[in-house]
Amino acid sequence: MIPRKKILAVVGARPQFIKHAPLSKALEKDFLLKSVHTGQHYDDNMSRIFFDELKIQKPDFQLKDIGKSHAEQTGNMLISLERIFQQEQPDAVLVYGDTNSTLSAALAAVKLHIQVIHIEAGLRSFNIQMPEEVNRIMTDHVSSILFCPSEVAQQNLFAENIRRNVFICGDVMKDMLRLTLPYTRRLFQEKKYYFATIHRPYNTDAKDRMLEILNTFNALPYPVLFPIHPRTTKLLAGFGVQLEQFKNISFIEPVGYFESLSYQYYCEAIITDSGGVQKEAYWLEKKCITIRPETEWVETLTNHCNTLLFDSLSELASKLQEIPTYFDPGLYGTGDASNEISEQLKNCLC
Ligand code: UD1
Ligand code: UDP
């Protein structure tokens, strides 16, 4: 019998646990799959909850205390991951998205001549000030097998002369949503409300900007349910902002995936700067306002489904009234990306 190929997946941040849940289940059938948790996200409600509720295999390796700054995180992970890769000698290292964990794993692997598989390849915001843009460009350029969620993403890679082993496979987050939606029940009892998440540095890291966003939410016609990312919580505490003054905002701790999906499913509209939440809003056919100057999920901007708003926050209430005219049910695949990826890898790796 031919030995199964060994894939070592590297995860570290909340959205990566959610992406890994369906894909790991598909890969386990045909590959020897192991995983490393880099410890980039470490609070129980940013990490453990997803392994528990989405029934993800416990990681085989767990890094700790990787630091805070980009250089610290990337450097520390690079050193630790190199040791693990040398010890494990996988046939390929699999990475997701665009976090510092993604870049470190891709760099460590390529220098050991281990193939890199990039899930969510080809996304571009064309804003190089975003750490994620740097991470995704560099990761794409050292990857040997690239899975794109859309044709636009594939074209972005072609434009950078990345052509070999580039596949369109849809989005694994859609798989997770498709599996979860039938079990979704209302968990927030407010009849009409908005759901919000904000964690991008350009929204959170300056006190005036953060206050402008909160004051705008506070003036909306319906209450805003806002699970706060620990990055945002820590910055608000540091700014000395009293959350009780925002009577229209229900601040809650970060929640698990099932809860997040329920809140999104039953809300009036979604306000976010998250990548994953923009897609979920689209698949749930909710109006989304993205508090960013640009998005890499450009397809969601059609038919008023998703609207970018950055400088003119005073227009938030009126933009929320714009009604989407059509949601394409096939956007970013059919919800079966994990099996497609696994099948393709059987051809590429074996
Ligand atoms: C990271 C990713 C971002 C992704 C986001 C998903 C990078 C460069 N950024 O941003 O692309 O959208 O994750 O959520 O990789 N913290 C805690 N507990 C935790 C995690 C974080 O307290 O469990 C706090 C720490 O103070 C930390 C800060 O949040 O310094 C920022 O965390 P970090 O992982 O560096 O970046 P994110 O903003 O979470
Ligand atoms: N999410 C969650 N709990 C929360 C907020 C978000 O489970 O309190 C989920 C959300 O439904 C989506 C993913 O986290 O599936 C998005 O991750 P995040 O916004 O942290 O990162 P990004 O997608 O911006 O990289």
Image (spheres, rainbow, N blue to C red):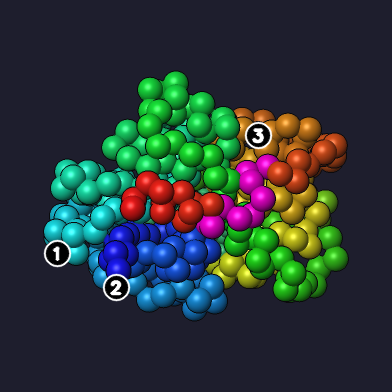
187 over 206 or under it: above or below: below
Which amino acid type corresponds to the residue marked 2 in the rendered image? Asp
Residue shown at 49%/68% (left/top)?
25
Q: Please name the residue that numbered disc 2 is placed on.
A: 60
Q: Please name the residue that numbered disc 3 is placed on.
A: 299
Q: Residues within 10 Å of mark 2 (few under 14, many from 20)?
A: few
Q: Residues within 10 Å of mark 3 (few under 14, many from 20)?
A: some
66 over 60 or under it: above or below: above
- Which of discs 1 and 3 lies nearer the camera? The answer is 1
Q: Please name the residue that numbered disc 1 is placed on.
A: 87
For this view, does 208 lie left or right of residue 186?
left
Residue shown at 14%/59% (left/top)?
86
**Is 337 in the magenta?**
yes
Q: CA distance from mark 2 to mark 3?
A: 37 Å
Q: CA distance from mark 1 to mark 2?
A: 12 Å
Quadrant containing ligand 1: bottom left
Residue shown at 81%/68% (left/top)?
190
Which amino acid type corresponds to the residue marked 1 in the rendered image? Gln
Mark yes or no: residue 290 visible.
yes
First to last magenta residue range: 331-339
Local SS, label 2: loop
Mark toward the start of the polypeptide (1 vs 3) = 1
Percent from the top left, x then y, of residue 55?
A: 50, 76
**Is 290 in the magenta?**
no
Local SS, label 1: helix
Percent from the top left, x then y, of residue 130?
A: 42, 36
Q: CA distance from mark 1 to mark 3?
A: 42 Å
Percent from the top left, x then y, of residue 195?
A: 70, 57
Percent from the top left, x then y, of residue 119?
A: 44, 48
